[in-house]
Image: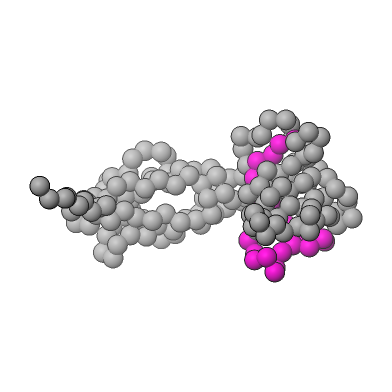
């Protein structure tokens, strides 16, 4: 007997759509849904499974609250698999608020914490782990209020943050021993 190969997409199935937008956002995010040329896209925002009787996607739309977007594409009568993306509105905290919210148990929620870099830990950027660890405060001269631990930087190593920069860290919170931390992200 010969080997059988299966395509990732069944012959009687349309290509699945792609849902894009900022999955963790502070105030709003714009959602764009794309599919194969000529396909019709339908979506839901209430958690229900979309069908060709759901809302037809015609243009990008904004979300201002935590919402699960589900989409399906139709090429003629052929339907794709359903694609699901959860967009989460996150609470924005000051460094002081974040430090006060830290407990010995890591928070289930993620937060956006904004503040000034006051200290670079071990030079700030780790070439070993490709991440950054800094102390942050609500004022540039505010001391060490909360440690942003092993953040994944948006920039490359030669563009890393420095003392005095105003940054945004997105992650969970935890107190490690006595140190309030933003746990990476």
- Where are the magenta residues, as a range? 154-175
Q: Nearer the viewer, residue 52 or 150?
A: 150
171 is within the stretch colored magenta: yes
- In the picture shown, does residue 152 fall above or below 99? below
Q: Is residue 67 found left or right of 164 in the rendered image?
A: left
Measured as percent of width and height from the top left, residue 152 is found at: 64, 54
- In the picture shown, does residue 156 fall above or below 151? below
Query: In which image quadrant can residue 51 be found?
Result: top left
Q: Residue at x 63, y 61 (%)?
A: 154
- In the picture shown, does residue 158 fall above or below 184? below
Q: Nearer the viewer, residue 67 or 151?
A: 151
Q: Is residue 9 found left or right of 31 in the rendered image?
A: left
Q: Residue at x 66, y 34 (%)?
A: 106
Measured as percent of width and height from the top left, residue 107 is found at: 65, 35
Q: Residue at x 76, y 57 (%)?
A: 124
Q: Is residue 5 found left or right of 54 in the rendered image?
A: left
């Amino acid at each position: 007997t010969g080997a059988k190969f299966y395509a990732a997409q069944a012959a009687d199935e349309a290509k699945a759509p792609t849902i894009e937008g900022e999955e963790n956002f502070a105030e709003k995010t714009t959602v764009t849904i794309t599919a194969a040329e000529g396909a019709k896209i339908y979506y839901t925002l209430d958690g229900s499974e979309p069908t060709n009787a759901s809302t037809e996607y015609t243009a990008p739309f904004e979300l201002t609250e935590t919402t699960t977007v589900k989409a399906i594409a139709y090429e003629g009568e052929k339907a794709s698999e359903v694609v699901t993306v959860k967009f989460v509105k996150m609470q924005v905290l000051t460094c002081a608020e974040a430090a006060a919210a830290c407990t010995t148990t890591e928070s289930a929620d993620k937060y956006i914490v904004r503040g000034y870099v006051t200290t670079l830990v071990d030079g700030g950027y780790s070439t070993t782990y490709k991440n950054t660890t800094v102390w942050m405060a609500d004022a540039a001269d505010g001391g060490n209020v909360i440690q942003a631990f092993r953040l994944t930087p948006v920039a490359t190593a030669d563009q890393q943050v420095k003392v005095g920069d105003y940054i945004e860290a997105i992650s969970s919170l935890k107190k490690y021993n006595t140190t309030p931390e933003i746990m990476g992200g």
